Image: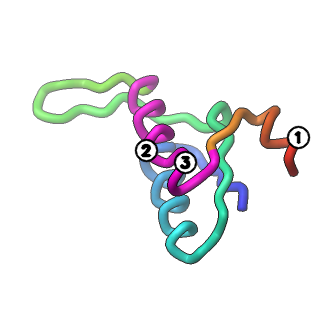
């Protein structure tokens, strides 16, 4: 299952984890999503770092994270 959406830290993360729980093999195109800066307790995490952290957390366990190019080659 190829998962698409808008904000990596919300719909991509949640949908991927739920799909995995239902037994789906998930694929994500790391260069096809976006996110935004997040803030907590006066500290801001830049969108680039949010993106990297969420995709790193999903890769290998919940999904296979590939470039769009590589994903299209295997489909």
On the image, which quarter does residue 67 sit in? top right
User: Upstream in the sequence, badge 1 or badge 3?
Assistant: 3
Q: Give the x, y percent position of residue 62.
A: 52, 56
Q: Secondary structure at mark 3?
A: loop
34 is higher (above) or lower (below) than 59 = above
Mark 3, residue position: 60
Circle number at residue 57: 2
Mark 1, residue position: 73
Q: Decide whether the magenta segment is chiefly helix, strand or loop.
A: helix
Q: CA distance from mark 2 to mark 1?
A: 24 Å
Q: Is residue 37 left or right of residue 25?
A: left
Q: Give the x, y percent position of residue 58.
A: 49, 48
Depth order, front residue of 74/48: 74
Q: Secondary structure at mark 2?
A: helix
Q: Give the x, y percent position of residue 73.
A: 88, 40
On the image, which quarter does residue 32 sit in? top right
Does the magenta segment cover residue 33? Answer: no
**Residue at (63, 48) in percent of width and height:** 64
């Amino acid at each position: 299952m190829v998962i698409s959406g808008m904000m990596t830290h919300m719909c991509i993360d949640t949908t991927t984890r739920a799909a995995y729980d239902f037994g789906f093999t998930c694929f994500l195109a790391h260069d096809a999503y976006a996110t935004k800066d997040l803030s907590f307790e006066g500290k801001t995490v830049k969108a680039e770092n949010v993106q990297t952290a969420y995709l790193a957390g999903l890769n290998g366990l919940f999904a296979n994270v590939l470039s769009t190019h590589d994903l299209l080659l295997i489909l």
